[in-house]
Image: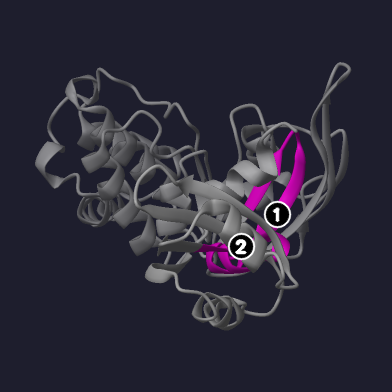
Amino acid sequence: MIHVENLTKYYDGFCAVDQITFDIHKGEILGLLGPNGAGKTTTLRMVTGFLRPTSGTIRIKEYSIEKHSLEIRKLLGYLPEAAPLYHDMLVYDYLGYVAMIREFGKEQIHYRIRELGELCGLNEVMHRPIGELSRGYKQRVGLAHAMMSDPEILVLDEPTSGLDPNQIVEIREIIKQIGKEKTIILSTHILSEAEATCDRVVIINRGRIVADDSTESLKQMARGESLINITLQNATFQSVENKLSEIQGIVSITPVDTTGETTEVIVNCQSSVDLRGEIYRKVKETDWILLDFHLETKTLEKIFREFTVES
């Protein structure tokens, strides 16, 4: 559906996007994830044709962004981070204005506004000025604007930025509903949003792609590590470290709490083999009492920090 290859953008001497390559498949919700200033917005602006790349290729379906910019824009709905709305207009009048620009007929305009009002949850505010709406409702109006021509692809730049937790959930649900029929690419630095909404995540740091996979695959496979939490009684940290270090594949044993009657440690395993059975057998050889023993799920937040924090 969308093919981006060696995409690069320089601002004077600064490289904002550095030779990134990725594909987006039809019907996929792709999250472009990264810290502020990573190059997410610049990438989206190039994909939508608002910025010309310094070098690289963007193809959407059979069209090239260099030769078929207008045809590509007809396939896209774009919601920038700051939705460009006329705050003095009523919601209904504004959407009608957008529809008129898109050359809808009079009957089509009324039908489409009613359809988008239902989809984006705008029916209650249709006859209120946009300037009086909450930020959450303004984002919904911007989303309805982007959806007006029923585009095949929806591009959303930080769609939940500045919203409160309830508004984030509402916008997220709308995006997931739209994603059943559309291809969506959205940028965000909110990890929970990417994890809850996206089928796949591309993590960008300093203009480069540092990870590209489903959220589940990233959590399970990132760097091939697993973390095992163990809480023991009648054991010292030193004795636990000495005993478990005998197991091949354990990288480190880190104390969590050794101040009371129990010893809690995190065992970092750099291995494709599940080492819990081997660890349990080593514990059974001692007089330690095993109080807790579980595999920690690697959160997207931990993975994100691994890929983006400065070393």
- Assign the N terminus to one quadrant of the image: bottom right
211 with respect to 160 (left or right)? right
For residue 250, which quarter of the picture? bottom right
Q: Are marks 1 and 2 in contact (CB under 8 Å)?
A: yes
| Residue 101 shows in this picture | yes
SS for dot 1? strand
* Up/down of 8 relative to 197, above or below: above
145 with respect to 29 (left or right)? left
- Assign the C terminus to one quadrant of the image: top right
Q: Which mark is residue 237?
A: none
The kind of residue on which mark 2 rests is Leu
SS for dot 2? helix
Q: Residue at x 47, y 31 (%)?
A: 81
Q: Residue at x 76, y 58 (%)?
A: 63
12 with respect to 69 (left or right)? right
Q: Does residue 254 belong to the magenta stretch?
A: no
The kind of residue on which mark 1 rests is Ala
For residue 206, which quarter of the picture? top right
Q: Residue at x 64, y 40 (%)?
A: 44
Tell which of 27 and 212 is nearer to you: 212
71 with respect to 31 (left or right)? right
Q: Which mark is residue 218?
A: 2
Crowd class of label 1 (few under 14; some 14 to 19; many from 20; radius 10 Å): some
Task: Name the residue beneath numbered marker 1.
Answer: 211
Looking at the picture, how far across and down is residue 151, in whole percent? 49, 56
Q: Which residues are magenta?
A: 202-228
Q: Does residue 208 belong to the magenta stretch?
A: yes
